[in-house]
Image (cartoon, helix red, strand yellow):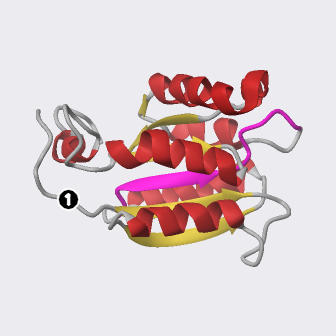
Amino acid sequence: MSAGTDFIPLHLCVLTVSDTRTAANDTSGDYLADALRAEGHVLHERAIVRDDKYALRALVSRWIADEAVHGILVTGGTGFTGRDSTPEALGPLLDKEMPGFGEMFRTLSYDEIGTSTLQSRAFAGLANATFLFALPGSTSACRTGWEKLIRAQLDARTRPCNLANLRPRLREGSVF
């Protein structure tokens, strides 16, 4: 596998997990939606869902069942408070985990917020051939995740390899 020479626009969904955010004050969701469109990707759908693991699973399950959706960017619910349930809600939907994502996110975040990065349970993986990235709810965390990790991996031109070019092969030998 090698990187391509042409940009391939992906259809991505943005999900904000919060009991307090609304369309008027969802700066993290705004950032992700604007950033993916600025790169040439398509915002397939966007939603705000309360911190409820069953509501999260229902929406994300619908998105991963939609073959037109290539990836999902989730912001919020990755902390340690009683209501933070994104990893518990979405982890069971993953067919494959991407452990390096959370590890790399926390490493990069350490340079920005020091040991507070330990409170992040950011993660990523693959669900029904759909990439899923879960980031903390702060806009700065979304910026770090997008600009330093996700953007390049969703760009088919990134060398030596990227996730975008894997898409045609994600269902090989699987039971998806």
Image quadrant holding the N terminus, namely top left
In-image side of 88 versus 119 (left or right): left
In-image side of 50 versus 13 (left or right): right
Q: Answer whether residue 128 is visible to the viewer in this image.
A: no
Q: Which residue is mark 1?
A: 7
Instruction: Give me the residue at 68% from left, 44% from top.
Output: 136
Query: Magenta-highlighted stretch: main secondary structure?
Result: loop
| Mark 1, other Cα within 10 Å: few <14 / some 14–19 / many ≥20 | some
Residue 140 image offset from top left, x and y in percent:
67, 49
For the magenta stretch, what is the residue range?
Answer: 69-81
Q: What amino acid is labelled 1 in the image?
A: Phe
Image quadrant holding the C terminus, namely top left
Instruction: Give me the residue at 21% from left, 49% from top.
Output: 156
Residue 42 image offset from top left, x and y in percent:
37, 70
| Residue 172, picture quadrant | top left
Residue 85 image offset from top left, x and y in percent:
75, 41
| Residue 66, picture quadrant | bottom left
Report helix, strand or loop for mark 1: loop
Instruction: Give me the residue at 59% from left, 63% from top.
Output: 31
139 relative to 160, above or below: below
